Image: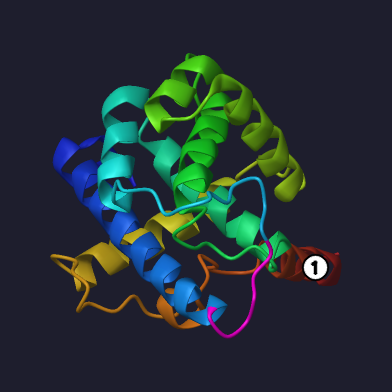
Amino acid sequence: MAELESPAVLSKLITFLSSMLEKVAESNDMDALIHPQKVSVFHGLTRPTITIQSYLERIFKYANCSPSCYVVAYVYLDRFTQRQPALPVNSFNVHRLLITSVLVAAKFMDDMYYNNAYYAKVGGISTLEMNFLEVDFLFGIGFQLNVTPTTFHTYCSYLQREMLLNPPLSKSNSVPYITTSSKVHLFDEDNQSSQQQTQQELAV
């Protein structure tokens, strides 16, 4: 997705991710009224007053990480929700999950990145909390930080397709599969890896 280098495309990606996460959070907020959800270190006592879009735009403005980081951060969020089904993305934890996923993605993807103290200021939390969130997030995804070119392309293709199908995004727009599942989950990487391994074995 070379188009990510374009400021206009990257801006649309930020808007799309914000809208998608807002829908997921709102859906899971409603579900929590029926099915109690587990509280984690990412869970705030109250809903942040800043919107998800404003928060992500703030991260985009000050983090100065590479465009690919936002796709990788989305991959990490997907992995987190797959491995931690008892911790769905909602309005109480989405902001902390966002700042943490971008921080981890920047550290893994970029040669140069800001430290945790800087990200803490951007995210409006203390450095100590940022450190705790990073460690908990890494354990939450099982330290599975590597994103293969195939996986990256799959997520890019999905995001690109959805941005083309849903311009401009609003609350009236629907995001197929993600909204109805109340998760960020896109596809099962473990299943895909298993299928690839099986194909290689059959080829041998």
Query: How far across and how far down the image is residue 155, in percent?
Result: 46, 58
Q: Residue furthest front?
A: 45
State whether residue 111 is above or below residue 158.
Answer: above
Residue under numbered circle 1: 203
Q: What kind of residue is marked 1? A: Ala
Along the viewing direction, whichever of 161 and 180 lies nearer the viewer? 180
Along the viewing direction, whichever of 187 and 60 lies nearer the viewer? 60
Along the viewing direction, whichever of 121 and 161 lies nearer the viewer? 121
Circle 1: is it few (<14), some (14-19), or many (20+) Cα within 10 Å? Answer: few
Q: Is residue 17 left or right of residue 167?
A: right
* Quadrant assignment, res 178: bottom left
Q: Residue at x 60, y 45 (%)?
A: 147
State whether residue 174 is above or below residue 199.
Answer: below
- Range shown magenta: 33-38
Q: Residue at x 72, y 44 (%)?
A: 144
Query: How far across and how far down the image is residue 162, in percent?
Result: 29, 68
Query: How far across and how far down the image is residue 128, in percent?
Result: 62, 23
Q: Is residue 20 left or right of residue 35?
A: left
Helix or strand or loop: what does disc 1 sit on?
Answer: helix
Q: Residue 167 colored magenta? A: no
